Image: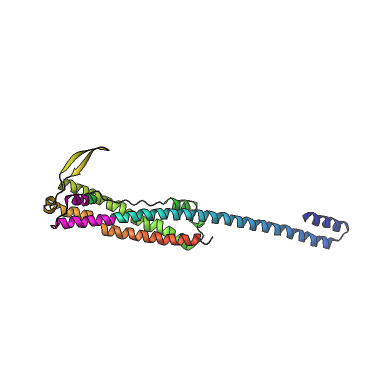
Amino acid sequence: MIKFFRSIRQRLLSENRFSKYLLYAIGEIILVVIGILIALQINNWNQERINRDYELTMLREVKEALDKDIYNMEGGLKALEDLKQSVIVLTTVRNGSTYPQDSLAYHFNNVRQGGIALVINYSPYESIKSTGLDKISNSELRNSITNLYEVKLKAVEFWVNEFIRRKLYEKNDLVASIFEKKIIPDTTDGIKVEYIINHDVIRTNDQFDNFLVVSGGYIPIAIRNYNYAIEEMKSQLEEIVSELEKN
């Protein structure tokens, strides 16, 4: 096409038809401009496609992380519910009820050893943040993901991992002060410490009340925090799935 215009231009110049040459020259310029604009638009489309592919890939990674974190937190929630039941059993024994020795030992060890640690996978979110959160084109989704990882989950994680961990230290100190212990052989670790559990100690040692408070006082709040975090993560998951289904 450009060669065609050039041949026309040369012929018009040779025939001294300057006005028509000017018209064809303008047409040639317009043709070049249109070609450039088309090339730019194609490049923009390609870049938008690349950006969208990257965005969807990162959202899928966030979705996968949320699925796993929700699964783990639901397991932690079940452990908290079991722990609560064991605290209730020990409280009834403290108030005079009698349990079979094996059952009593099970619930005591469940409370003594019971603890939770919350580990959230921030990696997909941090990857998006490092390359620019604006890569998420949906502004509402971008804001909700940021709020989830920067505010909501960090608050729950801090409360569980810092506050409850201090309670575990207090609980272990109380156990050591209340119960006698014995050292027994263990095929895995060589030796194992066991505490001698009986109804009389539970009913007569005033420190056992402190043990129950330290062991069970945080559980209702922990359960609420876990339920809150799970609900927020599931809500975020629905938003991400909705965005992914647009493609």
- Residue 182, by quadrant, is top left
Whole-percent x, y for residue 112 in the image: 22, 49
Determine whether 94 is above or below 176 in the image.
below
Q: Residue at x 12, y 50 (%)?
A: 201
Residue situated in front as seen by the camera: 196 or 63: 196
Magenta stretch: includes residue 97: yes
Residue situated in front as seen by the camera: 139 or 9: 139
On-image quarter of the C terminus: bottom right
Left or right: 61 with respect to 227? right
The reply to whether residue 79 is in sight is yes
Q: Residue at x 67, y 56 (%)?
A: 39
Q: Which residue lies most toward the top here?
A: 190
On-image quarter of the N terminus: bottom right
Q: Which residue lies most toward the right here?
A: 15
Left or right: 150 with respect to 179? right
Magenta stretch: includes residue 84: yes
Whole-percent x, y for residue 134 in the image: 50, 57
Residue situated in front as seen by the camera: 128 or 198: 198
Residue situated in front as seen by the camera: 112 or 11: 112
- Residue 238, by quadrant, is bottom left
Whole-percent x, y for residue 130 in the image: 47, 51
Identify the image's colour scheme: rainbow, by chain, secondary structure or one colour.
Answer: rainbow
Q: Residue at x 33, y 58 (%)?
A: 226
- What's drawn in magenta, residue-wise? 80-108
Left or right: 93 with respect to 116? left
Principal SS element in the magenta part?
A: helix
The reply to whether residue 170 is in sight is no
Left or right: 152 with respect to 7? left
